[in-house]
Image (cartoon, coloured by chain):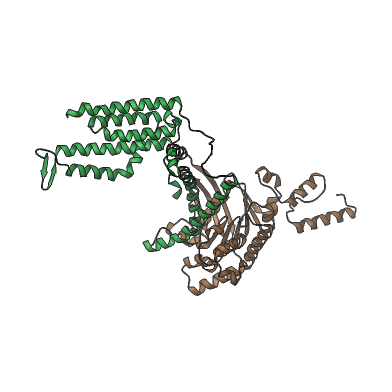
């Protein structure tokens, strides 16, 4: 499939020309295929947020090019809004962007900025609400009466209602309890499966990345350090640890087992696969094969 | 963009002027302002300007900053000069007479004096804000106004409000930036359209901003209460303001200089 986002030598320097200029991202080359679920990890200050802010034109690259759906994003800066509707960006703690009287109106803010018809807006609002687990009764409430987790869903629905081809989420589960966390992430995964929308998920939780992402981008010190399938990334655990990142708990267990001399693969990062691998190892042992 | 706005104009440094007690600096600045109006003769003004230049030199504030602080009030300076130039009528024949416009020697004299006075005034007060951080400035104001607390003026509360307001300006700017980006990502058009459309486009920014400001105020109040804040009564400070020998020396030097400048009035009396 074709690359939906392609970055060529993308760099961004904050406060260029000033004495306190700092390089946020440097010479990023990557291409994200349409329909992928990509995880983005990196320690604090590695340039993750700066990178995703480029994806929908909130930041303009200092140098380098960015192509979205095959088009050069900054060929004509007046057309930048077109790309903002193509790439839906959900910021960290998005509940602080709510402002309307009712949840319904707030979700409709994005679509109405697109200049759609009333009917189309209503249709999109309702399908986005449903997708995010917001019921009819909640649509008529004021967003400020809702709980934190509910507000978060409303904010995400507000971006989904624009039906972007790429959905970028910056730590959508930050600050939620474990149940709220799982709910939101699995809804995003379901949305991804159902609509085929490309998803870029920024997260500090390796468990979440392992569970949901097919591919992983690793940022380190404003550069792109790795970009590969999830199993290949987590097989490089020592490198990740050196960058101040971690690997899923289950991968750590397998690494330790291997250190202890047990013959098992190290690219294990999800629970079901781990169970299968252990069972197989046990069976091998029973069968008399050396472990 | 919005982040570039500088709040206050503190220019950090470690010169003698920077280290002076904020109370002394405030008092001397007030003294300097009075001097500018007392020394109503060209010689006095020139000397006041020289005095100020020396102080700027001592505090190592670049010349560029003075020009920047003067830029916003340039229209006022020009307006004052023009007004004085045309509307002061002196004795005797006007120097220039062209239709209804008459310019007298007296007018030119006044125009120049007023222009120089305003420039010195702004540059002088700017020196105070350049060399004093907003926090120590409010500290100084609080201590100077302390006697008025007897007249039931809520001095401590006013100073605390000023400090909090100053503290939250950068936070709110950052917050505005974030909200603007979030709404831009949802297709908000903030920089185009008619005035009406632009005002309407501000609503999605202002409402979340106000809500977060109230939330922060609430949290701050709670945090202050948790640490048993109960107003200024009986409150002690970590950093006590104390007049040092340098402060008194600076006071003596400045007052002597002010007196010398003011005495030019006597010299120029005849002119």
Q: Relative to A149, is A258 above or below?
A: above
Q: Which image quarter holds the N terminus of chain A? A: bottom right
Magenta stretch holds residue B84 = no
The answer to whether residue B170 shows anywhere in this view is yes
Q: Relative to A256, is A126 above or below?
A: below
Q: Return the residue found at the far left.
A: B93
Q: Position of residue A56 (x, y in %)?
A: 51, 57
Q: Position of residue A150 (x, y in %)?
A: 61, 63
Q: Relative to B207, is B141 above or below?
A: above
Q: Position of residue B135 (x, y in %)?
A: 47, 39
Total marks placed: 0
Q: Return the residue found at the far bottom.
A: A119
Residue B144 falls in image quadrant = top left
- Picture colour for chain A: brown
Q: Nearer the viewer, residue B270 or B183?
A: B270
The answer to whether residue A59 shows anywhere in this view is no
Q: Position of residue B131 (x, y in %)?
A: 42, 35
Q: Nearer the viewer, residue A11 or B142?
A: B142
Q: Nearer the viewer, residue A251 or B16?
A: B16
Q: Which residues are magenta?
A: B140-144
Query: At x 81% / y 55%, what residue is drawn?
Result: A278
By secondary structure, the bulk of the magenta-drawn segment is best described as: helix
Query: At x 65% / y 44%, what residue is drawn?
Result: A244
Query: Which chain appears green?
Result: B
């Amino acid at each position: 499939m074709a690359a939906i986002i392609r970055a060529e030598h993308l760099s961004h320097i904050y406060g260029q020309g000033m004495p306190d200029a700092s390089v946020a991202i440097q010479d990023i080359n990557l291409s994200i295929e349409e329909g992928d679920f990509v995880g983005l990890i990196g320690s604090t200050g590695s340039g993750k947020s700066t990178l995703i802010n480029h994806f929908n034109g909130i930041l303009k690259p200092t140098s380098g090019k960015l192509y979205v759906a095959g088009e050069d994003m900054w060929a004509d800066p007046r057309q930048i809004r077109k790309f903002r509707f193509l790439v839906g960006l959900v910021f960290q703690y998005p509940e602080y962007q709510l402002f309307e009287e009712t949840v319904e109106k707030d979700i409709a803010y994005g679509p109405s900025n697109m200049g759609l018809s009333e009917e189309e807006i209503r249709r999109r609002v309702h399908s986005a609400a449903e997708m995010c687990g917001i019921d009819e009764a909640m649509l008529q409430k004021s967003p400020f009466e809702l709980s934190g987790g509910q507000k978060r869903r409303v904010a995400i629905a507000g971006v989904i209602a624009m039906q972007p081809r790429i959905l970028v989420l910056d730590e959508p589960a930050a600050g939620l309890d474990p149940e709220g966390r799982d709910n939101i992430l699995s809804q995003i995964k379901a949305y991804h499966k159902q609509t085929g929308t490309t998803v870029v998920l920024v997260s500090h939780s390796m468990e979440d990345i392992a569970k949901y992402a097919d591919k992983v981008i690793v940022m380190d010190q404003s550069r792109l350090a790795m970009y590969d399938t999830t199993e290949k990334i987590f097989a490089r655990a020592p490198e990740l640890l050196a960058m101040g990142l971690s690997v899923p708990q289950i991968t750590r267990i397998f690494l330790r087992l291997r250190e202890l001399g047990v013959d098992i693969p190290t690219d294990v990062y999800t629970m079901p696969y781990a169970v299968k691998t252990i069972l197989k190892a046990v069976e091998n042992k029973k069968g008399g094969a050396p472990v | 963009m919005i982040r570039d706005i500088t709040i206050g104009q503190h220019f950090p440094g470690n010169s003698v002027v920077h280290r002076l007690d904020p109370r002394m600096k405030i008092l001397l600045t007030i003294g300097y302002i009075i001097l500018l109006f007392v020394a109503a003769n060209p010689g006095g003004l020139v000397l006041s300007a020289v005095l100020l230049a020396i102080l700027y030199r001592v505090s190592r504030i670049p010349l560029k900053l003075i020009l920047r602080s003067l830029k916003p009030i340039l229209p006022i300076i020009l307006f004052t000069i023009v007004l004085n130039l045309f509307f002061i009528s002196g004795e005797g024949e006007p120097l220039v007479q062209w239709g209804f416009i008459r310019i007298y020697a007296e007018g030119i004299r006044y125009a120049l004096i007023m222009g120089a006075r305003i420039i010195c005034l702004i540059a002088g007060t700017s020196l105070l804000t350049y060399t004093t951080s907003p926090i120590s400035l409010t500290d100084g104001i609080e201590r100077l106004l302390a006697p008025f607390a007897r007249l039931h003026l809520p001095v401590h509360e006013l100073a605390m409000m000023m400090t909090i307001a100053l503290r939250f300006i950068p936070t709110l700017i950052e917050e505005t930036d974030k909200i603007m980006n979030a709404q831009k990502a949802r297709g908000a058009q903030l920089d185009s359209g008619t005035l009406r459309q632009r005002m309407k486009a501000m609503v999605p920014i202002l409402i979340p901003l106000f809500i977060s400001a109230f939330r922060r105020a609430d949290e701050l109040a709670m945090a202050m209460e948790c640490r048993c804040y109960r107003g200024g009564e009986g409150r002690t400070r970590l950093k006590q303001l104390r007049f040092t020998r340098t402060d008194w020396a600076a006071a003596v030097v400045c007052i002597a200089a002010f007196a010398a400048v003011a005495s030019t009035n006597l010299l120029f009396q005849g002119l």
